[in-house]
Image (cartoon, helix red, strand yellow):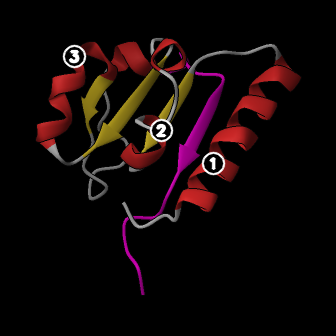
Amino acid sequence: FWYSKFTIDTLCDATRESLALCNGKRVAFLSTPSLFFSLKSNERKECAVFDFDKSLGSCGGNYHFYDFNHPTNIDDGCRGQFDLVVIDPPFIS
């Protein structure tokens, strides 16, 4: 939620371009819910958001709880399932 519209559009376009280069479609958005929700609904179907904010659970199976204090603590079913991971550090200094 700290990104400007220009930054969101640029990062979403870069995500699409990266997927096109590798013929991929699955993206894990790690601590970047604003990017996940800025994608078109049909694009989000193949993506997942990993975040600490449990209120994001409203996006169904596309939400996975993620605590950056325990970075390897993710569901085993998610490992190796994504073509691209978009990560934003959780701290702003």
Query: Residue, x 47% and y 38% (percent of image)?
Result: 38
Query: Residue, x 37% and y 44% (percent of image)?
Result: 33
Residue 10 higher or lower than 6, as above or below = above
Residue situated furthest left in the rendering:
55
| N-term-proximal mark, 3 vs 2 | 2
Q: Residues within 10 Å of mark 2 (few under 14, many from 20)?
A: some
Q: Residues within 10 Å of mark 1 (few under 14, many from 20)?
A: some
Q: Which x, y percent locates residue 64?
A: 27, 29
Residue situated furthest bottom in the rendering:
93
Residue situated furthest right in the rendering:
21
**Element assignment for label 3:** helix
Residue 16 higher or lower than 79, as above or below = below
- Magenta stretch secondary structure, dominant: loop
Q: Amino acid at mark 2?
A: Ser
Query: Residue, x 46% and y 64% (percent of image)?
Result: 89
Query: Residue, x 27% and y 42% (percent of image)?
Result: 66
Q: Amino acid at mark 3?
A: Gly
**Element assignment for label 2:** loop
| N-term-proximal mark, 3 vs 1 | 1
Circles 2 and 1: CB distance less than 8 Å? yes
Q: Which residue is mark 1?
A: 9
**Element assignment for label 1:** helix
22 in magenta: no
Number of numbered tags placed on the structure image? 3
Q: Which x, y percent locates residue 19?
A: 75, 25
Q: Amino acid at mark 1?
A: Asp
Q: CA distance from mark 2 to mark 1?
A: 8 Å
Q: Which residue is mark 2?
A: 38
Specify the label residue 60 is tagged with.
Answer: 3
Quadrant holding the C terminus: bottom left
Question: Magenta residues, as a range?
Answer: 79-93
Q: CA distance from mark 3 to mark 1?
A: 24 Å
